[in-house]
Image (cartoon, rainbow, N blue to C red):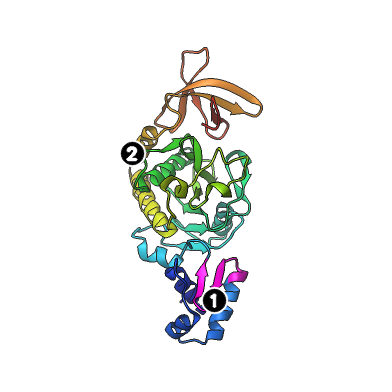
Amino acid sequence: MSTTKEKVLSFIQKAYPNPISGQLISSELAISRTAVWKSIQRLKEEGYEIDSIGRSGYQFKEPPISKALLQEQLTTTLIGKELLVFPTISSTNTRAKELADQDLIGDGAVLISEEQTAARGRIGRTWNSLKGKTISLSIVLKPDLQPAKASLLTQLMAAAFINSLPENDSVKVKWPNDIVVNGKKLCGILTEMSSELTKIHYVFVGIGINTNLLVEDFPEDISSKATSLAILQNQTIEPNHLISQFLKEFETLYLNFIESEDPTPFLDSCRKASAVIGQDIYLLKGNQRQLAHAVEIDDEGQLLVQLAGETDLTPVFAGEISIRGLDGYI
């Protein structure tokens, strides 16, 4: 059963982009104005950015991620049936692992936050998201797969995200884990696993999406390398619809993959939307840089490249090497 605080939160979230009066909330919930005010103060202490708009009432500063709205919109049978939404968190993947280790969440659980303060990328990179203008989301999975196949879930997530966008011709996959538009990063994906030699306990597939970041929101050193959906579509992005459509696409691809163990449907999407296939690229490992030509993505999800001066194809393993374009990020 929802608490008074959660009910107050839901009213303000559903009213966005309009303010809602404390009087209306108190009347609908049959509580005092003081109880409404106290609930809002607790929400602010938890990290929710709620403005008081004079006599108009209360309003979120940015489009809010709403658990209540997501539950209304989701039509999935597994993915997101267990839903945890945070205003701010260190890392959704880290929190997912902590909860899974304690058996507090199960297969298909989804963790979402408007802000991450200690997010982790591939090869140990860290980054921070901007509150209310990004989506950080992790899906907890317990697939009956060999551990070697878990890395394919990165490309499954990339395909699901692209498929969920109404206009996606300019949205590309920078193998293995970035989604880009015109050479600028839009999303990053991180897949982590808890397993034994032949058995997966859990897989945690996380994605960070730049939703409502504006050009001036990006630090100067990355403004030429990153973009957002708001910039791409020239409009404010409503996060709940985006998330529900994405989770629907993810579930369709995931359940088909678990049943058939055939990655072709989502790998074909990644091949079609590849930002690297057919391109000359640099392979980066530590301080080393090697020129190569990206040829194809094989049925194991590996990138096959032709190294400079060689004729044979060489597989690239995602956990060891980063890719850059000859003139920049990609």
What residue is disc 2 on? 265
User: Residue at 39% across / 43% down in the picture?
Assistant: 162
Image height of 311 relative to 70, above or below: above
Relative placement, left or right, of 165 versus 60 is: left
Q: Position of residue 194 (x, y in %)?
A: 55, 48
What residue is disc 1 on? 54
Look at the image and give the residue range highlighted in magenta.
44-60
Mark 2 or mark 1, earlier in chain: 1
Q: Nearer the viewer, residue 174 or 102?
A: 174
SS at badge 1:
loop
Q: Which of the 4 image quadrants contains residue 243?
A: bottom left
Relative placement, left or right, of 181 versus 96 is: left
Q: Which of the 4 image quadrants contains residue 117?
A: bottom right
Q: Nearer the viewer, residue 279 or 82?
A: 279
- Other residues around mark 2 within 10 Å, as few (<14) / some (14–19) / many (≥20): few
Q: Amino acid at mark 1?
A: Gly
**Distance from the alpha carbon under mark 2 to that under mark 1:** 53 Å
Image height of 57 relative to 68, above or below: below
Q: Nearer the viewer, residue 234 or 173?
A: 234
Q: Residue most toward the right?
A: 287
Magenta stretch holds residue 59? yes
Residue 206 visible in the picture: no
Q: How many marks?
A: 2
Relative placement, left or right, of 320 versus 150 is: right
Q: Position of residue 269 (x, y in %)?
A: 36, 37
Q: Residue most toward the front?
A: 54
Image height of 171 relative to 107, above or below: above
Q: Nearer the viewer, residue 268 or 107?
A: 268
Q: Amino acid at mark 2?
A: Pro
Magenta stretch holds residue 53? yes
Q: Position of residue 118 (x, y in %)?
A: 63, 52
Q: Position of residue 242 (x, y in %)?
A: 40, 54
